[in-house]
Image: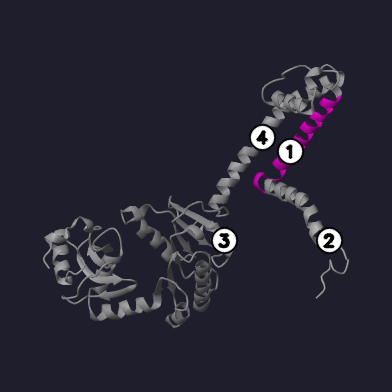
């Protein structure tokens, strides 16, 4: 191929690019003015713009009238400084010409008006800030928090369980992202963001890129929504979260057990099939009487016993599970029921199961056990 330069032709720049460059300034100014208008309201914004125009006009008029006749107004910035000081303190020096004195009188008249407009602007901004926060129109400025995507009656229970733990996790910030008009909770550590959990923009407003955990609920807050649509929205939300923050630990509620295969294609860390678990619990409770009360005691805070994951103490690698169970029960009054290692889990391990490096134990205890205080040499092998 023959290049443009070889043909003797001068490369022509795209006119579209030049047009966009010329429009950057006006577009930026228009966007800024529109943003100010949204924050302060049309009335206060108009008054503020008029005041700015009047003060700059007064500065220009004062400079034209006094320059060359008054040595204090040797530059235009001296006139700007005079107007600024006159508004906020008092006239630093007197004007000498008739037009200058008339302009100075006008600035003095506008002084109380400008203070009133600035006060109104600040009040309007603070009011809008409070309203936007209550209606969920703002952004979440937190990190390592929990994001609850969607809303149902389970949302209030989740927040209640988090706050009832009584440990560091109970003080963790929570952000609720749901398509609601106002906050569904009065929890002081919870921020409400009104938006669509399937939309990238709204997920970013909820700080999903900085979140540590995301709980995706089957959102039944929409009118006339069915089970399939709820699971579809949940799946879209899960995929959006994974694309924005792959490191976020995701706990996803699935309503219809038949849809679980679709969610298995995602990298969600926890899948809770609510219909399946509820049905299984009812069936087993009918045969194993009292089971529902035991499960309720283990899964709800703060009364009764709870589940806790703990790392095995240094030196416990190679110890048999029976010996670890004995020591934990005797010394810390907790009962290990499962072992976790690299994402795999073994419930009710055999007595001669040997603990390995990096193993975790799922224990039942009234409070989180301080397992690191145990010393391996005091434990039988």
* Mark 2, residue position: 15
User: Where's the N terminus, which quadrant?
Assistant: bottom right
39 within the magenta span = yes
Instruction: Please give the label number shown on residue 47.
Output: 1
Circles 2 and 4, Cβ within 8 Å, touching? The answer is: no
Which quadrant would residue 78 be assigned to in this image?
A: top right
The residue under the point 48% across, 80% down is: 262
Residue 122 or 261: which is nearer the viewer? 261
Q: CA distance from mark 2 to mark 4?
A: 43 Å
Which percent across, then down, holds residue 86?
71, 23
Magenta portion: prevailing SS class: helix
Specify which label sits upstream in the sequence, 1 or 2: 2
Residue 6 or 185: which is nearer the viewer? 6
Please indicate, yes or no, whether residue 40 appears anywhere in the rendered image: yes
Specify which label sits upstream in the sequence, 1 or 4: 1
Specify which label sits upstream in the sequence, 1 or 3: 1
In the rendered structure, the answer to whether residue 339 lies left or right of residue 130 reads left
Instruction: Tell us which disc is closer to us: 2 or 4.
Output: 2
Q: Secondary structure at mark 1?
A: helix
Which percent across, then down, holds residue 180?
54, 61
133 within the magenta span = no
Q: Residues within 10 Å of mark 4 (few under 14, many from 20)?
A: some
Circles 1 and 2, Cβ within 8 Å, touching? The answer is: no
Q: Looking at this rendering, what residue extends furthest in the front direction?
A: 6
* Mark 4, residue position: 118
Specify which label sits upstream in the sequence, 4 or 3: 4
Residue 325 or 297: which is nearer the viewer? 325
In the rendered structure, the answer to whether residue 135 lies left or right of residue 25 reads left
Which percent across, then down, holds residue 72?
78, 19
User: Where's the C terminus, which quadrant?
Assistant: bottom left
Instruction: Tell us which disc is closer to us: 4 or 3.
Output: 3
Q: CA distance from mark 1 to mark 2?
A: 39 Å
């Amino acid at each position: 191929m023959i290049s443009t330069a070889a043909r003797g032709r001068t490369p022509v720049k795209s006119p579209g690019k030049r047009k966009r460059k010329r429009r950057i300034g006006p577009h930026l100014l228009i966007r800024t003015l529109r943003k100010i208008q949204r924050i302060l309201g049309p009335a206060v914004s108009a008054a503020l713009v008029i005041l700015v125009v009047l003060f700059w006009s007064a500065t220009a008029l004062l400079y034209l009238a006094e320059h060359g006749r008054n040595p204090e107004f040797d530059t235009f910035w001296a006139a700007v400084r005079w107007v600024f000081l006159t508004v906020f303190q008092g006239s630093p020096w007197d004007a000498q010409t008739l037009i200058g004195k008339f302009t100075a009188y006008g600035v003095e008249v506008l002084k109380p008006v400008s203070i009133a407009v600035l006060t109104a602007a600040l009040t309007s901004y603070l009011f809008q800030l409070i309203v936007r926060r209550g209606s969920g129109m703002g952004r979440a400025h937190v990190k390592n928090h929990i994001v609850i995507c969607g809303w149902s009656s389970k949302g209030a229970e989740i927040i209640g369980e988090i706050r009832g733990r009584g440990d560091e996790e109970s003080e963790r910030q929570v952000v609720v992202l749901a398509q609601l008009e106002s906050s569904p909770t009065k929890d002081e550590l919870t921020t409400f963001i009104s938006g669509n959990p399937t939309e990238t923009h709204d997920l970013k407003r909820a700080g999903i890129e900085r979140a540590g955990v995301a709980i995706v609920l089957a959102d039944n807050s929409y009118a006339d929504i069915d089970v399939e649509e709820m699971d579809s929205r949940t799946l879209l939300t899960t995929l959006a979260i994974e694309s924005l923050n792959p490191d976020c630990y995701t706990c996803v509620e699935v309503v219809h057990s038949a849809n679980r295969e679709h969610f298995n294609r995602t990298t969600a860390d926890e899948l809770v099939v609510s219909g399946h678990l509820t049905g299984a619990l009812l069936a087993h409770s009918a045969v194993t009487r009292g089971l529902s009360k035991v499960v309720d005691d283990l899964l709800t805070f703060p009364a009764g016993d709870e589940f806790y994951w703990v790392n095995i103490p240094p030196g416990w690698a190679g110890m048999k599970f029976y010996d670890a169970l004995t020591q934990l029960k005797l010394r810390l009054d907790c009962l290990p029921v499962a072992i976790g290692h690299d994402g795999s889990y073994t419930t009710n391990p055999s007595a001669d199961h040997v603990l390995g490096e990096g193993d975790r134990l799922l224990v039942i205890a009234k409070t989180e056990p301080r397992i690191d205080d145990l010393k391996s040499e005091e434990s039988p092998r």
